[in-house]
Image (spheres, grey):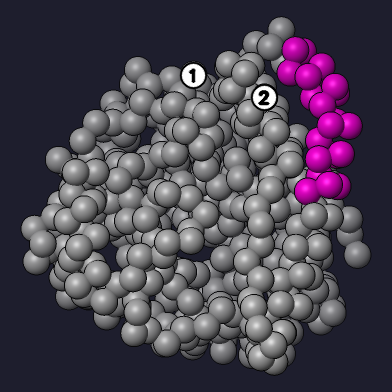
Amino acid sequence: MNDALAFEIVRALSVQALPEDAPDRLSRFSVGQWHRSLGWFHAGGIALYFWQRMKSSGAQAVVPRNIQTVLENCLAMNRGRLEVMVEEFRSVNRVFREARIQHAALKGFALVPDYCPDPALRNQYDFDFLVPAESMELADRYLKDAGFARKERSRCSHPVVYLAANRQTHPPVSLEDIYSPLTHRSLEVHTRLWEAEAEKISFELPANPHARVWERDWNGLKFHSLSPEDTLIFQVMHAFQHMLNNKCRISIFLEIARFVQTHSSDDVFWLKFAALLRGRRRLSEATAVVFSLAFRLFGPEIPSEIKVLLGRWLRPPMALWVSRYGLRLALGNFSSSKDSLHLHRLFVEDPRLWATVRRRKLYPFQRPTVPEGGHPGRLRARYRQIIHVARRIHFHVGSALHYVWGLPAWRYTVRASNRAGNAMSHIETLAGPEIPKAGALGFRRR
């Protein structure tokens, strides 16, 4: 990606308004620089959000014509994909209703319109539902009867992943394919909102979210989702987990910032939200970190209750991590290094548990699935898999060395920040839509 262009694109997506000088600043980049950023654009989930912002602001002319064509085609494909996914979502809801299973949609359509004004602007790859743990066996039986096959070779036991047996799909072979109606998608059934065992971090989440589920109606599509307060907590947990695992799309911070901006004057909501966090230290700290990143990147108007939350729960080392590593990692979709380990360590107090986490994150081992046989399509898939594995090995080795090399300096600055014991100077920088200049994030202008 072109780092300077990525910075300007994020700046142009400020949830309050398009900055007045944004069109002029964006127009300075060459066609080649835009092309080199297309992969980052799509991977971060903000390509269509940006294109919609440019069109609604009458500033689309700053985007090169061939890039306009790419984005418009992607938007058209995603609208076609949305039509197919609406019907699939409707069929899954019907299964849960007929089985009389408590359920709530997570992400996806549940984020419209507070987090996302138009679902055709989102990169949605799957459906996520929360069901009570005791209903999982019944849900499994009904989903299989409805034609959903359980994916037995998934990487983890939770959530349980299903694929529609009669659905014609294929993995994406190009960047634009991620918007195609034929691109692979799945159904994920959750029985909990956080993987404590996997991350070795225990969060005391609000009890019994199913008691606060409410019915939604989007364009005649009726479904159950978590309450607004629980939905925001889940979005925070979802972002935090992906941050720790080096694969968090920047779009999730945009969507959280948009929600905060939309509800910035809703004092009743923020009082309810703060009440759910009260007495839950770790959850409040994770919320403060995620909010801090979202606010620094996309600049919503910050409610007074949230300013209090940040001032109380954003510990100095966490504020330091956001400034030193978090912004750069977010702009790279958390895939550029393992510096998220520094954040992870702040949440794992037991040295023995931390040793387990660090070993697993620094030196992950998973045997790749390589297609068998000599069919030309399988040979191409095998070749792509080998290239992918080689790139992942290169990433893991390089980023592990980078992490170890920078660890002494990080520990020193953490001790210094703990002695200073004040994160308020960081909080004050969250009020505006600007993020630090590109040079401050380690960007290279090209």
What is the distance, in whole Å, between disc 2 and disc 1 at their CAs? 29 Å
Left or right of 315 in this view: 142: left
Q: Quadrant of the N terminus?
A: bottom right
Q: Residue furthest top?
A: 419
- Could you say where residue 437 lies in the image, as x and y percent from the top left? 78, 47
Q: Is residue 136 left or right of residue 250?
A: left
In this view, which residue lies farthest toward the front?
373
The residue carrying pointer 1 sits among few (fewer than 14), some (14 to 19) or many (20 or more) residues within 10 Å by Cα, namely: some
Q: Which labelled disc corresponds to residue 396?
A: none
Q: Nearer the viewer, residue 336 or 437?
A: 336
Side (left or right) of 384 relative to 404:
left
Decide if residue 64 is in sight here: yes
On residue 355, the disc is 2
- Of residue 205 and residue 38, the one placed in the foreground of this image is 205
Above-or-below relation of 215 to 424? below
Q: Which residues are magenta?
A: 396-416
- Secondary structure under the numbered disc 2 in the rendered image: helix
Residue 159 or residue 56, whichever sits in front: 159
Which residue is labeled 1 in the image? Answer: 312
The kind of residue on which mark 2 rests is Ala
How far across and down, in percent of the image, does residue 424 sit?
60, 21
Residue 116 pos. (x, y %): 41, 63
Residue at x 66% of width, y 83% of height: 373
Q: Earlier in the sequence, mark 2 or mark 1?
A: 1
**Which residue sits at x=40%, y=49%?**
158
